[in-house]
Amino acid sequence: MKKGMKAVVILLVISLLPLSNLFAQSNEDVEVKSTTKGPKYGSDSVTCVMHLSLYREFFKQKNYKDAYPHWKWVFLNCPLASQNTYIDGGKMVTARIDEAKDAAKKELLIDTLMMVYDQRITYFNREGYVLGRKGVDLFTYRPDKTEQIYQILKKSVDLSGNKSEGSPLVYYFRSIIGMVDLQKLDKSAIVDGYDQISQIIDYNIKLSKDNAQQLASWENIKGNIESTFEPYATCPDLISIYDKKFTEKPEDIELLKKITNILERKDCTKEELFYKATENLHKLEPSAQSAYLMGTLNLKKENFNKASDYLQEAANLYEDSSDKIKALELLANINFNQRNFSQARANALKILQLNPNYGKAYMLIGDLYAASSSMCTGDDLGGKTVFWAAIDKYLKARSVDPSVEADANAKIAQYSKHFPAAQDLFFRDLQEGTAYTIGCWINETTTIRGGK
């Protein structure tokens, strides 16, 4: 085609293209503004629009060969024209890299791809997001550039946080391990990186619970990170990494959070370091959650008094009723095991104030009464009257909470066998069906029932 004829064709193409199509943005381009002042279409706006329109038309047809020279002109001469310049350019340069046979040419194209990312950041910001893409591509094409990859992806993840994409997280973690292998980072960096990345992944898994496709993607990323971390995840390894740090900085809140998070995540909660770190964290930043955790840890150690104190603190600090009930129920069971029956009942009654239909609280009170038969023998019936009061609670539990029905029925059948015999009631002038007040610590009115 002659030069004059080609110019006519170009102008004709431009005239036929709606401007809305020329500068249409992709999904990545939404709500992104230029951060650099200057004319949008450069010093020669007419030529810029021409090259922009031509490259876009060729690009849409996947004719990257003819699109590339026009794109290159736009990239060099009117970098503010559209963010699509960088999105499309990345795709075209990547395609050329994959097709390149000559090693030197391939290296030059990789340099170009990196420059596309850098210029996109310069003119359209989104640094965390773009660095993530840049780091993944650098890992793909120059995997030996471990330190450079690490620095790029670390900055990306630090900037993007919970908005990080999955691929940069995976390659960031691999680059951390690479840095440790090169002895440029301490082994603890692997654990720190795992903790940071896992929190981001868990956040996005929760966020994606109503989107099956996104959820599956994040679950897959989680599995990838977990399998990569597995060789470094043993409790002895984790303790050896963090024990020294804890000794040096026992009141460093960020360190304490890191220790407790990672040890809990990897099921190392039986380790003494977990207890110490949790205890220190609770002292420095007391919360309902940390109080409850300290309660459960002391319960495992059979430090019942400490456990009770922490659980009472948790019950006081929790705002949600279900959380309060969780703490009070555990506290009441500790009271029961310590044979502090009246306190156990008091905590069960607090549960019922929060939720009158919580059958387990009635079941617990029933158990407390049944367990009192040997200590409430002042009724001349050998303590058997307590079973009347116990049955009352099991019946109540069954009536308000179907989930405890089977357990309630079993205990009703079990303890009904211990009712006073009918002849014992007769000799004491007690009539079945009439009211009877049980003394001892129970002090509750029940109904007389005869046994066999």
Image: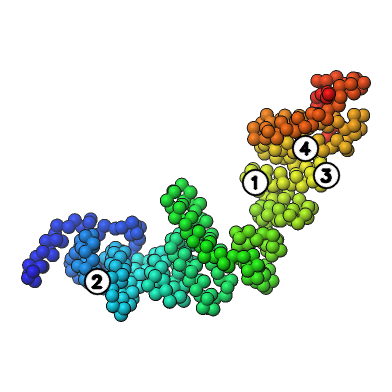
Q: How many marks?
A: 4
How many other residues sit within 10 Å of disc 3, few (<14), some (14-19) or many (≥20)? some
Indicate the amino acid at tag 3: Arg
The CA distance from mark 1 to mark 2 is 61 Å
- The reply to whether residue 162 is visible in this rendering is no
Q: Is residue 355 above or below residue 274?
A: above
- The reply to whether residue 265 is visible in this rendering is yes
1 or 4: tag closer to the N-terminus: 1
The CA distance from mark 1 to mark 4 is 23 Å
Task: Please name the residue shown 10% across and 64% down the image.
Answer: 9
Instruction: Give the labeled residue for mark 4.
Output: 367
Nearest-to-viewer mark from 1 and 4:
4
Is 396 positioned to the left or the right of 39 in the image? right
Residue 84 image position (x, y, % from top left): 29, 63
Instruction: Give the labeled residue for mark 3.
Output: 339
Indicate the amino acid at tag 2: Lys
| Callout 2 touching callout 3 (CB < 8 Å) | no
In depth, the one of 24 and 142 nearer the eye is: 142
Tell me the quadrant of the picture where the C terminus can be found. top right
Q: Is residue 299 above or below residue 273?
A: above
2 or 4: tag closer to the N-terminus: 2
Residue 13 image position (x, y, % from top left): 14, 61
The CA distance from mark 3 to mark 1 is 25 Å
3 or 1: tag closer to the N-terminus: 1
